[in-house]
Image (spheres, helix red, strand yellow):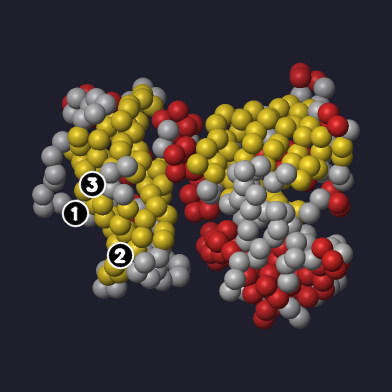
Amino acid sequence: MSAIDIPGAQAEATGIELRARVRYGRHDGGFVLDIDVRLPGHGVTAVFGPSGCGKTTLLRAAAGLTRPAPGRVAVNGEVWQDDARRLWRPTHRRPLGLVFQDAGLFEHLTVQGNLDFGLRRVPLPERRVALPQAVDLLGIGHLLERRPAQLSGGERQRVAIARALATSPRLLLMDEPLAALDAARKAELLPYFERITRELNAPMLYVTHSLDEVARLADHLLLLGAGRVTAQGPATALLARLDVARQQGDGASALLEGTVTALDAAYQLVQVRFGGGVIQCVQAAGSAPHAPGQRVRLRVQARDVSLALSRARDTSILNVLPATVQSLADDGPAQTLVALDAGGAPLLARITRKSAQALALTPGLPVYAQIKGVAVLD
């Protein structure tokens, strides 16, 4: 299937401009979202942060559901709000697709009826996404005659996303679309999001508080805290920064991107080659089988990486990777976070301060990073 090509969506030099100040409440200062960022005009930007930090408010400002004052919103050169020029385009005139936690389907309509409703939002001359393409992309062809009450939670969200695509969006806005689903339904839906990112040439802002979803989907990462941007950048580079990792607590992780080179069916293991060598991990339960040559992204949590000064022998640990210490930072009274370079790929290790001192870890020191195969998240 060819990519859904939306003219203007690939003009990445312009990107997404978001300049917004939104205030809620007047007592004790209330809450203020105050941001001024330029984001990539392609791929998935994950908006990540704790509850109440302003993630949904940012999305509402981009959609025009909340009007920042002052504000500016522009998507790949198309300006939707610019207070300096007294320009305002209301939500219904913004070519965007919006999906919330609740799918928001019309219960009295069939799936086909819900999709047709989305299609009718777009005048015929402006339709650039064929409805059959959206149906195929989300795998809902067999659901078209059902009503929402007959759908699972994951199926409802797939229909909601297809309806959003039917509007020929230049920007997709996802507000924690998996938050209301259990783990099984999330695992069912994530591959469809990955397919959208591969085949849809339009940027996506994806709000989440789940590091698993960030690791699986994000190309770019925007971190929010108390209504302010605390950091932004490519997801693989940003998550490996010690200042960012310390904010993630026990979930601090690094992302490794590589290519599947072999499958071990007898042990359900996948072998992946990345910049730092080869890593083996367990095939995730319920996930589609990998194939040699397939590009994958692995999440390695800092708590699952131990360090040694020499290569261990006769060990149950499958992955022993040569690496170099880049930097260290105390992480509470008892722990140390260590940033590593494994052949150009970033890794993190969380160890005790006692161990860091016993190994005399310093920047530039060669070490071996030890990672259990069962600990690598595919």
Residue count near mark 1 (Cα–Cα under 10 Å), binned few <14, some 14–19, many ≥20: few
Whether residue 235 sits left or right of residue 302 in the image: it is: right
Say whether disc 1 or disc 3 marks the residue closer to the N-terminus.
Answer: 1
- Whole-angstrom CA distance, mark 2 to mark 1, is 22 Å
- Which callout, 3 or 2, points to the residue nearer the camera? 2
Q: Is residue 154 above or below residue 357?
A: below
Report the mark closest to the observer, 1 or 3. Answer: 3
Percent across and percent down for residue 178 are 62, 55
The percent coordinates of residue 100 (x first, y second) are 72, 53
> Looking at the picture, which amino acid does disc 1 mark?
Ser
Tell me the SS state at disc 1.
Answer: loop
For residue 324, which quarter of the picture? top left
Label 3: few (<14), some or many (≥20) within 10 Å? some
**Cβ–Cβ under 8 Å for marks 1 and 3:** no
Amino acid type, label 3:
Leu
- The percent coordinates of residue 190 (x first, y second) are 55, 61
- The 10 Å Cα crowd at callout 2, few under 14, some 14 to 19, many 20 or more, is some
Q: As drawn, is 64 to the left or to the right of 241?
A: right
The residue beneath circle 1 is 316
Q: Which residue is mark 2?
A: 261
